[in-house]
Amino acid sequence: MIRNWQQDMPSVQAYWINRILYDVHHKQGHLQQYRDDADAYMKDIPLPAEIKSLIRDNEVGKMYLAGANPYLLRAHCLGVKIPEHAFLASLRAVAGEARRG
Amino acid sequence: MAELVGAFATSHTPVMLNLPDALSEADRNTIYRHFQQLGKSLAALKPDTVVVVSDDHLHHFFLDNFPAFCIGTGDAYPAPAEHWLRAERQTLKGDSRLGAHLLGEALAADFDPSFSMQLTLDHGVLTPLILADLAASVTLVPLLINCVQPPMPTMSRCLQWGRFIGEAIRSYPGNSRIVILATGGISHDVATPRMGMVNEEFDREFLRLLGTGDDRALIRHATDRVNEAGNGAEEIRNWMVAHGAAKGAAFHVHFYKAVPSWYTGIALVEWRLRE
């Protein structure tokens, strides 16, 4: 059975993933900055390049596995208008890797 | 002293507003009609204030400071926090005096909530109020519980909070009429590989237990089986507060349907405090 949460306590990496997802949609002007140049927007965030790529490329399922809070992930997908079918397909593709127990 | 004159609970989900057409017209209209009926029932109680027990979905709070319980003590609450929610920007009226009373009583009773005089509320509060035609008319005190980011308060603690809130309302000086409205849940997953799964068996057992008065079994079900019902089902913490405040009052399920197209088990219920 897939558990409700990937992490019982957010890792520091998850914090920074979530920091991006939160700031993009809650700080004035950040959504436009992110849309204009996601790489530049994330330049000073202390995350590995491969994690930043997941965010930039809308790899929803892998962001979930990496510890993105599901509510922030959902809001991000609505906020940047990721098609619903692509959002769901990306999540379902990682079902086998999700935390179980 | 004030009187707790009603207690209600409803599911909430942003897709009720954002993706209405994902559901058949018949089902959608049935659900909307039940929300409107709940709104009429609530309004008929002529409440001075509605204590809305819900959760912030990481729109106001963030991981830099995330309270387990937060009481709103402001007199105005902008909503919605989500720029993408298909809802008119508005300001909900707040009852700062009752909020301050609940905060003070909580601390005196060894509960340790945070408080905020400037909350921006999200779909968890706003969506049910809009669908029930209550957003413009009610004055509210929000009680926000962390149901969205582990670690979270226990189900048992939320039931204790409910019992406390009921008593704190009843100790409020004056003749105010107060209603509790809990929102959230029930079974659903948000942004997980299971999204779209609705565990109807979990939901129906949860609803049954709310009506039995067997709080020990209710807590066991909520605690031990919530992982079978999805991360969105963690919001039944809000229902536990309403249940605790209602002190075993007659429980009625007005509507339940598993609605996978809206990703959620949709229920609207009432504890009839005056039967």
Image (spheres, rainbow, N blue to C red):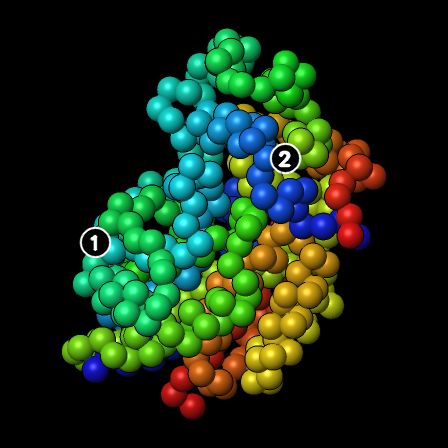
- According to the picture, the residue beneath numbered tag 2 turns out to be A67
Residue at the image point whose x is 32% and y is 72% from the top: B109
Chain under callout 1: B
Residue placed furthest toward the bottom: B275
Q: Residue B103: which numbered mark, if any? A: none
- According to the picture, the residue beneath numbered tag 1 turns out to be B75
Mark-to-mark CA distance, 1 and 2: 36 Å
Rendered image quadrant of residue B166: bottom left
Q: Is residue B75 above or below residue B173?
A: above
Question: Which residue is at the front of the view, B127 or B142?
Answer: B142
Q: Is residue B59 left or right of residue B168?
A: right
Local SS, label 1: loop
Rendered image quadrant of residue B61: top left
Which amino acid lies under the numbered mark 1 shown in the image of this protein? Asp
* Disc 1 versus disc 2: nearer the observer: 2
Could you confirm whether marks 1 and 2 are on the same chain? no
Q: Is residue B20 left or right of residue B126?
A: right
Q: Quadrant of the N terminus of chain B?
A: bottom left
Q: Is residue B65 left or right of residue A11?
A: left
Local SS, label 2: loop
Where's residue B250, x and y in %? 50, 86
Q: Residues within 10 Å of mark 2 (few under 14, many from 20)?
A: many
Residue at the image point whose x is 16% and y is 78% from the top: B174
Where's residue B127, x and y in %? 44, 52
Which amino acid lies under the numbered mark 2 shown in the image of this protein? Gly
